[in-house]
Image (spheres, helix red, strand yellow):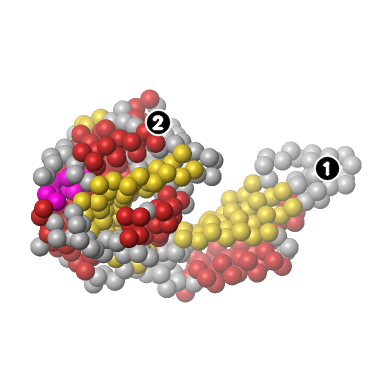
């Protein structure tokens, strides 16, 4: 039996449920689970507590028997609605745009995957269709990391191919940059400057900061740190510093420098990480790195070629943002493909093109036909 889901209506319903990353996503997960079950999916619900002790839920929906098949991957969390007035969770459709927090990144794309999966009759499927919905994508892909460890459905027989439905303006994407976050901490001794007995952690870290400025310059100017498959071809090397707003008449006890950049395939990110660690060691600073490897699949891979055929496009592209692909790429062959433009993500007044939501539903449906039903 197939089910008719109106993608615009479903997008509005999902946007209307607040699921900002730093709050529990139980409410939106309850709604999505019910929706999937109502569309003929068997649903596995995976609960965990995040670092703040909040209840988070991942969902794995599966329709059809057999091995392999096609999975659609979305996250149901959103960035905070900073700057939004009341209407962040009051979605509106006007002039071909559906506006609301998370409409583009990525509740609209998620709704399109559900609408496509709902429309297919399980009896027509030679291989199964999966709808995978994670929490905490905006928080270092914690939900995806939990899912690949905990999901029986996914671990027993993961889909052979997958679509990460992040917004790409419906252009298939075969590679994206990863993410590296390195925190470097200097410790001083706090004292009131009237005693002059303190040691400011800011002075301890200062030489290191100058070296990082030099490293940043190198990554921008030396082409060996770049990859011309990407636009921009550079690492986006950035640094922020915090001494917790230490007052000028107190010596800072702790300075934390956070370095952030976006590793690319076949680049010199390893070298950058090693340089940071070596320089930090020279100045006796504490270092704690976190790295998500970039995503890359051959543009000739079957999933990329299938996506191109379904979209009627000649060539796949690359993007600079990160996704849950950094986790799921170890389990199956992926392409990134979704409605909406990442330029609208994480903005006040976020919107998604309603025509692209309809187009995505069609394209995903065709990909199901090509990979699971023919
Ligand atoms: Zn996203």
SS of the residue under disc 1: loop
Asked if residue 109 shows in the view, the reply is no
Asked if the residue under mark 2 is in contact with the one under mark 1, i.e. CB atoms within 8 Å, the reply is: no
The quadrant the N terminus occupies is top left
Front-most of 76 and 270?
A: 76
Q: Which residues are magenta?
A: 114-122
* Label 1: few (<14), some (14–19) or many (≥20) C-alpha neighbours in 10 Å: some
Q: Residue furthest top?
A: 86
Q: Residue furthest right?
A: 195
Ligand 1 neighbours mark 1 (CB distance < 8 Å):
no
Of mark 1 and mark 2, the one earlier in the sequence is 2
Q: Residue at x 59, y 70 (%)?
A: 274
Q: Residue at x 25, y 33 (%)?
A: 12
Q: Is residue 118 magenta?
A: yes
- Where residue 301 sits in the image (x, y, percent)? 24, 70
Q: Residue at x 21, y 69 (%)?
A: 302
- Where residue 28 sits in the image (x, y, percent)? 34, 36
- Which residue bears the numbered disc 1? 191
Residue 108 as seen in the image, left or right of residue 241 = left
Q: Quadrant of residue 6?
A: top left
Residue 295 as seen in the image, left or right of residue 263 = left
- Which residue bears the numbered disc 2? 84
Q: Say above or below: 102 vs 92.
A: below
The quadrant the C terminus occupies is bottom left
Q: CA distance from mark 1 to mark 2?
A: 41 Å
- Where residue 291 sits in the image (x, y, percent)? 50, 61
Q: Which mark is residue 338?
A: none
Q: Is residue 74 magenta?
A: no
Q: Main secondary structure of the magenta part?
A: helix
- Where residue 91 sits in the image (x, y, percent)? 28, 31
Q: Residue at x 34, y 32 (%)?
A: 17
């Amino acid at each position: 039996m197939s089910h008719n889901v109106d993608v615009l209506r479903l997008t509005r319903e999902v946007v209307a449920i607040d699921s900002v990353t730093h709050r529990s996503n139980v409410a939106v997960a309850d709604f999505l689970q019910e929706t999937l079950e109502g569309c003929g999916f068997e649903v596995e619900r995976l609960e965990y507590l995040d670092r703040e002790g909040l209840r988070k839920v991942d969902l794995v929906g599966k329709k059809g028997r057999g091995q392999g098949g096609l999975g659609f991957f979305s996250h149901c969390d959103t960035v905070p609605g900073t700057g939004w007035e009341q209407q962040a969770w009051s979605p509106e459709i006007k002039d071909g745009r559906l506006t609301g927090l998370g409409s583009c990144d990525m509740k609209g794309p998620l709704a399109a995957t559900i609408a496509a999966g709902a429309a297919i009759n399980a009896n027509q499927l030679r291989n199964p269709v999966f709808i995978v919905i994670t929490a905490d994508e905006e928080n270092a892909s914690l939900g995806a990391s939990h899912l690949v460890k905990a999901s029986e459905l996914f671990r027993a027989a993961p889909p052979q191919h997958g679509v990460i439905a992040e917004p790409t303006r419906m252009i298939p994407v075969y590679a994206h940059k990863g993410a590296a976050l390195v925190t470097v901490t200097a410790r001083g001794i706090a004292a009131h400057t009237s005693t002059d007995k303190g040691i400011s952690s800011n002075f301890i870290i200062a030489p290191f900061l100058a070296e990082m400025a030099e490293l940043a310059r190198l990554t921008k100017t030396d082409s060996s740190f770049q990859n011309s498959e990407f636009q921009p071809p550079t690492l986006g090397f950035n640094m922020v510093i915090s001494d917790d707003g230490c007052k000028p008449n107190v010596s800072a006890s702790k300075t934390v420098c956070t370095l952030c950049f976006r590793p690319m395939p076949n680049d010199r990110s390893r070298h950058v990480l090693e340089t940071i660690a070596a320089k930090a060691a020279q100045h006796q600073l504490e270092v704690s790195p976190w790295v998500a490897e970039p995503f890359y699949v051959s543009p000739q891979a079957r999933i990329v070629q299938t996506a191109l055929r379904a979209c009627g496009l000649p060539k796949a592209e690359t993007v600079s943002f990160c996704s849950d692909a950094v986790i799921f790429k170890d389990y199956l062959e992926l392409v990134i493909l979704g409605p909406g433009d990442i330029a609208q993500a994480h903005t006040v007044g976020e919107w998604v093109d309603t025509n692209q939501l309809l187009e995505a539903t069609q394209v995903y449906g065709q990909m199901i036909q090509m990979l699971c039903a023919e």
